[in-house]
Image: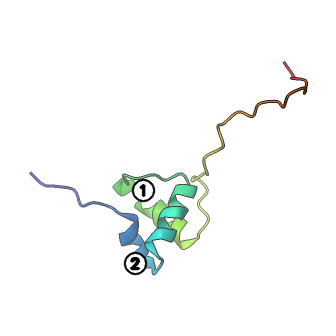
Amino acid sequence: MTTKPDITAADIAKELKVSPREARMKLRAAGIRAPYKPSDVAKMRAVIHGDKVSNVKPKADTKPTKPKKGEATTH
């Protein structure tokens, strides 16, 4: 049985001469979460390097805001 090599942000960060911590932060901000797939490597390199990637969008804040006490709602 063959095993797939693990893809880590630290390995790609070493190739690009960036700190592993900074690489993980950039990937999380871009919405790329671990475990990484081999198909994500190109996107990961672009995000860590700082290139603009059009198909990687940051995750939106999904927490709904509550109206403050006394404010009218728009229902």
Amino acid type at mark 1 = Asp
Q: How dense is the environment of label 1, judged by Cα within 10 Å: few (below 14), some, or many (20 and up)?
A: few
Q: Nearer the viewer, residue 43 or 17?
A: 17
Q: Looking at the image, which residue sits at the far bottom?
A: 17
Closest to the camera, between mark 1 and mark 2, is 2
In the rendered structure, which disc, 1 or 2, sits on the residue that comes first in sequence? Answer: 2
- Estimate the spatial distance between the alpha carbons at disc 1 and disc 2, rounded to whole Å: 16 Å
Question: Which residue in the structure is indicated by mark 1?
Answer: 40
Task: Check the image and report above or below for 15 versus 25.
Answer: below
The one of 19 and 15 positioned closer to us in this rendering: 19
- Badge 2 crowding class, 10 Å Cα cut-off, few under 14, some 14 to 19, many 20 or more, is few
* Quadrant of the rendered image containing residue 17: bottom left
- Horizontal and vertical percent position of residue 47: 54, 65
Residue shown at 36%/52% (left/top)? 35
Quadrant where the C terminus sits is top right
Side of 65 where 18 appears, left or right:
left
- Extreme front residue here? 69
Disc number placed over residue 21 in the picture, else none: none
Residue with the mark numbered 2: 15
Residue 34 at what x, y percent from top left?
40, 53
- Residue 45 location (% of width, % of height): 47, 68
Secondary structure, mark 1, is helix
**With 69 as the anchor, is 8 left or right in this view?**
left
Amino acid on which disc 2 is placed: Glu
Seen in the picture, residue 70 relative to 41 is either above or below; the reply is above
Which residue is at a point 35% across and 71% down the rendered structure image?
A: 11
Q: Secondary structure at mark 2?
A: helix
